[in-house]
Amino acid sequence: MSSVSVPYAEQPQWADVVPLPQYEGVEPLAPIFYTNEYKDATDYLRGIVKTGEKSQRVLDLTKHIIQLNPAHYTAWQYRYETLLAIKSPLDVELELMDEIAIKHMKTYQVWHHRRLLMTHLLRNTDEASTSSSSRSPSQLASTELTFIARTLAEDAKNYHTWSYRQWLLAFFNDDSLWDRELDFVDSMLNHDIRNNSAWHHRFFVVFQSGVREGEKDRDRILRREFTYVKQNISLAPNNASSWNYLRGILDYNKIPYSRLTSFVQPYTVPHADVPSDLVDLEDPPPSRGAQLPSPGAIEFLADVYEEEGGNSILKATELWKSLASEHDTIRRRYWNSRMKEGLRAIQVKS
């Protein structure tokens, strides 16, 4: 973070600008106290906005303010408008902002600014291809994906970063970008199998990328994803993210939960009840040393019984009861409410 030690009022090149104080002519009940440096810079920004100036020194001023407060939306927006007005190379701006984005990745305005830059570059392909780096829009997008991976190495679950990555993929919608994305997700999940953000991104890439497959491709993809998530459940049966992913596959493709009863059942009992010599590549059993029974599996099996209806709901209530009393006591009230709803449904039908 750089700092301008000399106030703008004492810099000759800013002598023509009249600074505008935030609280000019008013006395707020609860004024916000800023550092002198920040107050000085923002006073001059308000003066600049009033005159509508767009120049290199405006870029210098907005950069200074952003370094002091990366959530200053007006500074970001006026900076973007200035970049366009003076025809500053936007891909150079992306590189200039990399350090700020990594340091302040949880600030929404950082990612919104990058999104504006990338949108403009794509819609103005001639400008992108004749910039100082001579990169095509697809090359810029690929470079941006590499940058996003760097930020995720700092914080692998940051919402704004993942959201921006999904927007970038969907907006450019380039096959060469989509083709590499599953490998990226695999690397993230290999590093942390419990990264719920990475699981969510995998679902987005596989099922919500807009790619239209034929029926054979759809069946192949479903088999691949079922195999993938089952293997991960086998390795970490108490990982809620993988169970949620499994449910997502079924719900999205309108497949009944009962299709996976044989896979789920071994995860609902103590490990001692699972045959040690069980080998099933289609439905892999829990790994050695896994903590069983798995609350996620018990909940899943209860949903299977509830889906079946009739007397099977009694089996579901017994499973909910075990979750409330032993396996997932932190959500005791939720499971008790599920039991009451299940019993009420039985009484209504009878």
Image: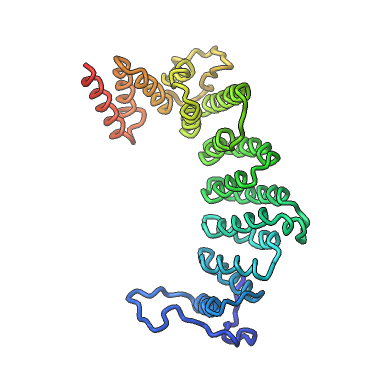
Residue at 55% across / 69% down in the picture?
A: 75
Which quadrant holds residue 100? bottom right
Quadrant of the frame with the N terminus: bottom right
User: Looking at the picture, does residue 326 appear above or below residue 188?
Assistant: above
Q: Where in the figure is residue 262, as x and y percent of width and height?
A: 47, 15
Q: Nearer the viewer, residue 157 or 213?
A: 213
Which quadrant holds residue 312? top left
Q: How many labels were placed on the picture?
A: 0
Residue at 30% across / 22% down in the picture?
A: 317
Q: Nearer the viewer, residue 160 or 38?
A: 160
Q: Where in the figure is residue 217, as x and y percent of width and height?
A: 63, 24
Q: Is residue 219 visible?
A: yes
Q: Where in the figure is residue 79, as x and y percent of width and height?
A: 59, 68
Q: Is residue 102 visible?
A: no
Q: In the drawing, does residue 166 fall left or right of residue 93?
A: left
Quadrant of the frame with the C terminus: top left
Which quadrant holds residue 179? top right
Q: Where in the figure is residue 275, as x and y percent of width and height?
A: 49, 12
User: Looking at the picture, does residue 77 appear above or below residue 15?
Assistant: above
User: What's the image's color scheme?
Assistant: rainbow
